Image (spheres, rainbow, N blue to C red):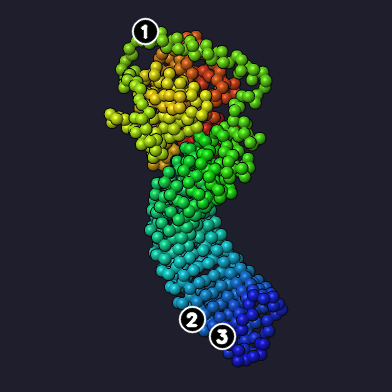
């Protein structure tokens, strides 16, 4: 066959041919124009005589076991396709430069060049800038290429695809790439490139794929990248990028995959994320993103894989995630999510991977739908998750104290309830006496404000737009808070209790009792209530500046030292009033930044009295079954359930440290040997 001198095309690819190629192949086939030997088992070297087949336009030898150095192809001046990838070819041991590249500058019609998956172990020469102006694809990935990418690569004016990933390249990404206006695909991942992402890449109006994963690129993401509407796949993960994500990057309507994981990016997710309507892979894990998940994310109906793991996201896991029916993987682990795992997620029929471990979740783990397939590892290291079907978690009917000794159980069951009943009776008696002998205190510290009134369910429903999710100010396992506007135009916060346990009903009763009795400029004011057997809500003063926690951890809010000091004084005055300003003592029992709300002039107001405790005269200590927030509780509260005024002061001290360090008590930086207070 190799002696048929008149043959023009030989196609032998995708067989099981083996052995060496004839050393005279180029001499005996002078008229050969196309030679296809790919996907076989050929061994040995590429014969140097191939250079004599000067009419060759296509030479394909990929996916064999060829060895030795790559010969000079400079005489093949008509060559258009050179495919020698996936062999064991090497560079010349005598020089670090890959000199055979220089010989290809004579091939002025070369369109596709592939030398990927070989053992070149050399440096790209500057001569690659002299390649054919017709070159469309340069493929040399996974070939142990070292050194910098020559700036001269910017001379390849017709280049559409650059494949240099999985090498050992160093130095900067050439700014000259911005001159290659036809570039559609840049693959530089898994190298050792550093420096900034050059803004010149924004000149590539046809750029669809940019892969820079696993390098050491630093700085911020150029904002102009968000103007490249041609993007389909953007992978910037596993670098050292920082700052916030440019807002216009969230408006790439045709983006299919976005991976920004394993960087130091920060900030919250904007509502503009809804513009990523066709994205099916979104990975923001291993960063410093914070804030809540915006409700607009449910517009991303094409999402298949979503990962927010290892960030600082907070708030409740949104129920609307259950609307993204295509989800196969959802990872929210290692964040600060709180509240319940939404039952709506059971409707995700295609969900195969789910992880909410290492958060602050509580309540029952769903067991319907896809949840039957998830192991306990998906839920470990949370605050108070329970399950009726998973033996690794306590039953939902049990409190943590029931796992203690039988003696403690007996004390809880037979002794503590009468004590609580007596305390409540004494508290109610004291309140009644106090109301009769109430002394007017100075207006600066005690104001009745708006009189407490009853408000109908219908008015509440109308004021909150039927309790629409867009009106939610916050939510937890016990309640959800909505912004509403009453019929007289007054803006209020409507706290609706989730009545799925007697414990929550008691929380409503306690908060109603406390808030209806106390008045202070630094305490949240109650405006009214709505209560029946199926619905309970408190109507509270609206705080336009939200919580102290939001101001401490959201990137677009800032508190200077003086403002922090003033808020700390506000909270201290509120505690002093609760502990010493009444004829009885009120313990808050759950003081933390999320329970400190800020009005329009940034005055602090202590809120959420659902766990409060009332003491009569002579009382200084009591026990409680319900645990407050871990990290803020005094030690005796956490271990024995003992609450005192000193416990509130302890919580205030922890919160004060948090205000000035911006570190939560359970921050990742605190290990077994270290805590916020030590």
Numbered label attached to residue 437: 1
Question: Foreground: 658 or 532?
Answer: 532
**Residue of label 3:** 33
Alpha carbon separation for disc pair 1 and 2? 102 Å
Of tags 3 and 2, the one toward the viewer is: 3
- Residue appearing at x 47%, y 48% in the figure: 265
First in sequence, mark 3 or 1: give its number.
3
* Marks 3 and 2, the one that precedes in the sequence: 3
The structure residue drawn at horizontal position 49% and vertical position 81%, both measured from the top left corner, is 109
- Can you say which quadrant of the picture contains the N terminus? bottom right
Counting from the top left corner in percent of width and height, residue 298 is at 45, 47
Question: How busy is the neighbourhood of tag 2: few (under 14 within 10 Å), some, or many (20 plus)?
Answer: some
* Secondary structure state at the residue bearing disc 1: loop
What is the distance, in whole Å, between disc 3 and disc 1 at their CAs?
109 Å
Between the C-alphas of marks 3 and 2, the distance is 16 Å
Tell me the quarter of the picture where residue 580 sits.
top left
């Amino acid at each position: 066959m190799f002696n048929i001198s008149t043959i023009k095309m030989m196609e032998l690819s995708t067989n099981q041919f083996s052995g060496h190629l004839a050393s005279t192949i180029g001499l005996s086939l002078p008229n050969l124009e196309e030679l296809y030997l790919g996907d076989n088992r050929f061994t040995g070297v590429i014969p140097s005589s191939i250079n004599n087949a000067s009419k060759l336009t296509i030479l394909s030898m990929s996916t064999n076991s060829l060895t030795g150095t790559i010969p000079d192809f400079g005489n093949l001046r008509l060559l258009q396709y050179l495919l020698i990838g996936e062999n064991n070819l090497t560079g010349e041991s005598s020089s670090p430069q890959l000199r055979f590249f220089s010989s290809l500058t004579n091939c002025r019609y070369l369109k596709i060049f592939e030398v990927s998956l070989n053992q070149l172990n050399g440096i790209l020469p500057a001569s690659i800038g002299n390649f054919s102006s017709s070159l469309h694809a340069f493929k040399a990935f996974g070939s142990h290429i070292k050194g910098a990418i020559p700036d001269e690569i910017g001379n390849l004016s017709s280049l559409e695809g650059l494949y240099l990933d999985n090498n050992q390249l160093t130095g900067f990404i050439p700014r000259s790439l911005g001159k290659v206006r036809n570039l559609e695909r840049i693959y530089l991942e898994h190298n050792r490139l550093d420096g900034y992402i050059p803004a010149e890449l924004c000149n590539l109006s046809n750029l669809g794929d940019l892969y820079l994963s696993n390098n050491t690129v630093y700085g911020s993401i150029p904002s102009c990248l968000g103007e490249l509407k041609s993007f389909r796949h953007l992978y910037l993960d596993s670098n050292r990028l920082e700052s916030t994500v440019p807002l216009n990057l969230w408006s790439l309507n045709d983006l299919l995959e976005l991976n920004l994981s394993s960087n130091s990016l920060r900030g919250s997710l904007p509502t503009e994320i809804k513009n990523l309507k066709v994205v099916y892979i979104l990975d923001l894990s291993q960063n410093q993103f914070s804030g809540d998940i915006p409700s607009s994310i449910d517009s991303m109906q094409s999402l298949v894989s979503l990962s927010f793991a290892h960030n600082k996201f907070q708030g409740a896991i949104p129920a609307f995630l259950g609307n993204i029916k295509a989800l196969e993987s959802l990872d929210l682990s290692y964040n600060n999510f709180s509240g319940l795992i939404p039952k709506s997620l059971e409707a995700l029929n295609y969900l195969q991977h789910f992880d909410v471990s290492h958060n602050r979740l509580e309540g029952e783990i769903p067991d319907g739908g896809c949840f039957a397939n998830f192991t306990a590892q998906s839920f470990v290291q949370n605050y108070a998750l329970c399950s009726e079907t998973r033996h690794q978690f306590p039953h939902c009917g049990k409190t943590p104290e029931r796992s203690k000794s039988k003696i403690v159980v007996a004390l809880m069951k037979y002794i503590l309830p009468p004590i609580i009943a007596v305390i409540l009776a004494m508290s109610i008696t004291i309140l009644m006496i106090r109301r009769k002998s109430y002394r007017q205190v100075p207006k600066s510290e005690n104001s009745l404000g708006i009189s407490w009134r009853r408000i109908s369910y219908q008015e509440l429903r109308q004021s909150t737009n039927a309790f629409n999710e867009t009106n939610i100010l916050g939510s937890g396992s016990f309640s959800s808070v909505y912004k509403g506007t009453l019929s007289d135009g007054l803006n209020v916060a409507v706290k609706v209790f989730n009545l799925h346990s007697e414990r929550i009903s008691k929380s409503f009763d306690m908060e109603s009792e406390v808030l209806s009795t106390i008045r202070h400029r630094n305490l949240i004011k109650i405006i009214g209530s709505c209560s029946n057997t199926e619905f309970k809500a408190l109507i509270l003063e609206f705080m336009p500046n939200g919580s102290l926690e939001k101001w401490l951890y959201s990137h677009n809010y800032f508190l200077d030292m003086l403002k922090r000091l003033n808020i700390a004084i506000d909270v201290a005055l509120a505690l002093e009033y609760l502990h010493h300003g009444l004829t009885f003592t009120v313990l808050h029992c759950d003081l933390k930044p999320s329970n400190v709300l800020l009005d329009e002039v940034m005055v602090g107001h202590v809120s959420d009295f659902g766990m409060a405790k009332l003491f009569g005269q002579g009382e200084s200590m009591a026990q409680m079954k319900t645990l407050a927030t871990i990290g803020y509780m005094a030690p005796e509260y956490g271990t024995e359930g003992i609450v005192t005024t000193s416990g509130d002061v302890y919580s205030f001290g922890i919160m004060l440290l948090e205000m000035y360090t911006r570190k939560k008590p359970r921050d990742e930086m605190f290990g077994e040997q270290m805590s916020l207070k030590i």
